Image (spheres, rainbow, N blue to C red):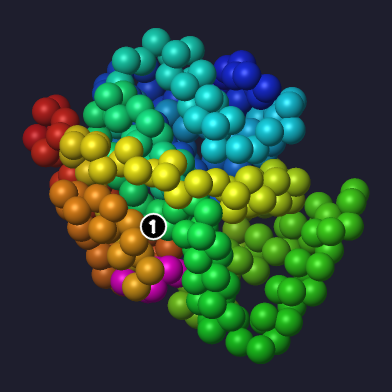
């Protein structure tokens, strides 16, 4: 794996690339407000691919210089990486919030998307983004129980306090959220410490505000995307039946429900996730056949 920095309008992006050869695969991590974890978790499931990932603006080792966290800013970052690596088109795989970015990117730049995989994607922008949050909070409350929910909201209150308190609160909020991605939070492993250290409450809050105000028409172009696509959710995912919003947006896509998995497939059903991804890419990448 090699690591390097690409300059984008208003941001310096920490980029990781699994190898120099192979068809390029852009991996967009979840969040918002958390750093990349896909290079260490999902990329190894597809060793033949040239997996490219990055810390999104303002998180991990990436810097946001202009304070912008709009969808347009995120898309400009993706394009800066594509142009910086002289890539004409690439496969795109987005997880959770990254799945929403992948949807918008395919809607705007479908000619640059060789194939599209939406892995437990967030539902959309504007009203659908608000529904995304409601569904995730509903699942978290059910799994955390009374005291876990009280603990979560106590930590969350610290996000409004600047400085070290906000950083401390963000670490605990993301730890609670991570645990609640598992059917039994008490049995969940703790998140990686380095990943937690790269989380940013500022990036999370600013992105949330921006995406909540976006026009749903932003995704209208996705109806014209005719390339290969797969929409995958875990049978115990956090969005419930609301995931049908995304499934209906891409009716021609392969629709997969991954058994024995929730939101973090590489931990909850690694073998099933690997098989689903490899089956998809074996059809759409000649050297995997």
- Graded by Cα atoms within 10 Å as few (under 14), some (14 to 19) or many (20 or more), the crowding at tag 1 reads many
Q: Quadrant of residue 24?
A: top left
Q: Look at 70% across and 64% down and name the residue there.
A: 173
Residue 127, horizontal then vertical, whole percent? 51, 60
Within the magenta stretch, is there residue 277? Answer: no
Q: Main secondary structure of the magenta part?
A: loop
Image location of residue 36, percent across then percent down:
55, 41
Magenta range is 235-240
Residue sitting at x 53%, y 25%: 76
The residue beneath circle 1 is 120
Q: Judge whether 22 appears above or below 268 on screen.
A: above
| Rendered residue at 9%/35% (across/down) | 289
Up the image or down, 214 lies above or below 81; here it is below
The quarter of the displayed image where residue 228 is located: top left
Does the magenta-highlighted stretch encompass residue 236?
yes
- Residue 147 visible in image: yes
């Amino acid at each position: 794996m090699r690591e390097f920095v690409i300059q984008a309008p208003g941001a310096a992006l920490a980029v990781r690339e699994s190898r120099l050869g192979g068809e390029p695969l852009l991996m967009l991590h979840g969040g918002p407000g958390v750093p990349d974890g896909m290079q260490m978790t999902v990329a190894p499931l597809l060793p033949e691919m040239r997996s490219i990932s990055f810390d999104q603006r303002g998180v991990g080792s990436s810097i946001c210089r202009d304070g912008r966290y709009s969808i347009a800013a995120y898309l400009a970052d993706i394009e800066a990486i594509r142009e910086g690596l002289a890539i004409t088109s690439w496969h795109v795989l987005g997880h959770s919030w990254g799945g929403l970015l992948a949807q918008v990117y395919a809607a705007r730049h479908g000619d640059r998307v060789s194939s599209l995989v939406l892995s437990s994607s967030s539902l959309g922008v504007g009203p659908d983004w608000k529904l995304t949050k409601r569904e995730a909070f509903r699942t978290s409350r059910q799994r955390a129980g009374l005291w876990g929910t009280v603990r979560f909201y106590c930590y969350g209150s610290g996000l409004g306090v600047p400085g070290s308190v906000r950083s401390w609160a963000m670490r605990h909020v993301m730890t609670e959220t991570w645990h609640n991605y598992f059917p039994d939070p008490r049995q969940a492993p703790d998140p990686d410490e380095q990943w937690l250290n790269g989380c940013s409450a500022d990036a999370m809050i600013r992105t949330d505000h921006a995406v909540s105000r976006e026009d749903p028409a932003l995704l209208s172009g996705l109806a014209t995307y005719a390339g290969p696509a797969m929409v995958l959710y875990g049978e115990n995912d956090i969005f419930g039946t609301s995931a049908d919003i995304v499934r209906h947006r891409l009716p021609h896509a392969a629709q997969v429900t991954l058994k024995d998995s929730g939101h973090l497939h590489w931990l909850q059903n690694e073998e099933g996730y690997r098989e689903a991804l490899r089956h998809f890419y074996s059809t759409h990448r000649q050297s995997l056949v």
